[in-house]
Structure formats: structure tokens, C-alpha cells
Image (cartoon, grey):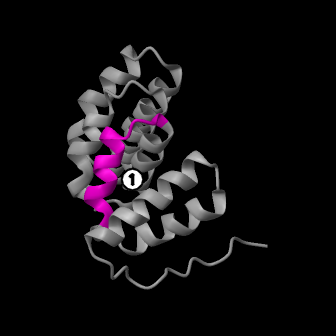
Amino acid sequence: MGLPEFNPPPAFMGGPEAVEATMLQWRKAILNKDVEAVERIDDIFRASASVFSEALQTSARKDPDPRVRAFSTRVLGNTKRKDAVPALRACLTDESEHVRANAAWALLQVNDQESVATLGHLATHDLSQVVQRAAADAIQGLRQLAASDHSP
């Protein structure tokens, strides 16, 4: 028995007010631990990544709740959008170890080869073993991606 097939919702057609409302619903769902709502809105984010990228980047960097920042960072990785790289790099210095670990993972997802040195520093100097492991895993994954890009 496999996982159910992902059927993306139709493209998000709302304007800035609708984006803001969706982000507020998602934040509330995270804080209330409403898994179904989080997953439903995550599907919307994946289907319309370009519409939500800026709002998710702001959330990842500035939301007062570390869980919301961590979720936002994770979603940015799932969207694999290169425009999120500066925000993801900024998240590597977040006070929350979960945000930093998710940022390391997300940089692997977007194949940001330029972050290897910074990730190397985290892998050896971050006070959190969770972050050290995530950074080391991201480096290993980035090296594998780089090697596969250069293979015949």
C-alpha cells in the first residue's frame, strides 16, 4: 500500500489580500497544531510557489514564533525556488536550532552549492547537534549533486 498520489490544487488566483489571509490561516494552523489544515495549505504553497515565495521568506525570517519560522523554512525548501536562497542563508543564524536545521536542509533542496562553506562552519561549530547533523547531511547531499552534475 503506497502513499496517496499528490493531486495539486488549482493555481492560487488570489491577490495580495488573499495571500496574506492564507498565510494567517497557515500560521494559526501551525500554532494550533492543526495538521490537516497545515497540509492542505502546504499543498496550495507547492502548487503556487511563485505567489507565496516572498510571504514565506518573510515568515521564515521574521515571524515571532520559532515553529512558524521553522515550518516556513521547510516549505521554502520544498518549493526548490532559487529566489529563496538569501532568506534561507539568513535563517542559518536564527536563534532556533530547528530553523537553522531546516535552513540547512532547504539549501540542499535548492542545490545552493555556494552555501557549502557556511554549512561546513555550522557542521563543526554550531552548539546544537541537530544543526551540526543537518548541516553535515546538507553538505554530503550538495557534494553528491555536484558530482552528478559533472558525470558523463
Q: Within the magenta stretch, is there residue 62?
A: yes
Q: Residue at x 64, y 49 (%)?
A: 33
Residue at coordinates 46% horizontally, 41% vertically from top-left? 70
Image coordinates of residue 112 in percent, x first then y, are 26, 47
Using the image, determine if residue 72 lies above or below residue 37. above
- The residue lying at 50 percent from left, 70 percent from top is 43
Residues 97 and 113: in front is 97
Q: Which of the 4 image quarters holds residue 3? A: bottom right
Residue 68 belongs to magenta span:
no
At label 1, which amino acid type do we have? Gly
The N terminus: image quadrant: bottom right
Does residue 146 sit above or below 99 in this rendering? Answer: below
Q: Position of residue 109 (x, y in %)?
A: 38, 52
Name the side, left or right, on which 51 lies relative to 4: left
Residue 64 % position (x, y): 40, 35
The residue pinned by badge 1 equals 77
Quadrant including the C terminus:
bottom left
The residue under the point 50% across, 66% down is: 41
Q: Position of residue 14 (x, y in %)?
A: 33, 78
Mark 1 Cα shell of 10 Å, populated few (<14), some (14-19), many (≥20): many
Figure label count = 1
Can residue 144 be seen? no
State left or right for residue 24 relative to residue 62.
right
Residue 13 vertical placement versus 68 (above, below)? below
* Closer-to-camera residue (76/133): 76
Is residue 30 visible in this depiction of the protein?
yes
What secondary structure predominates along the stretch shown in magenta?
helix
Q: Nearer the viewer, residue 71 or 146?
A: 71
At numbered mark 1, what does the secondary structure look like: helix, strand or loop? helix
Which contiguous range is marked in magenta?
A: 52-66
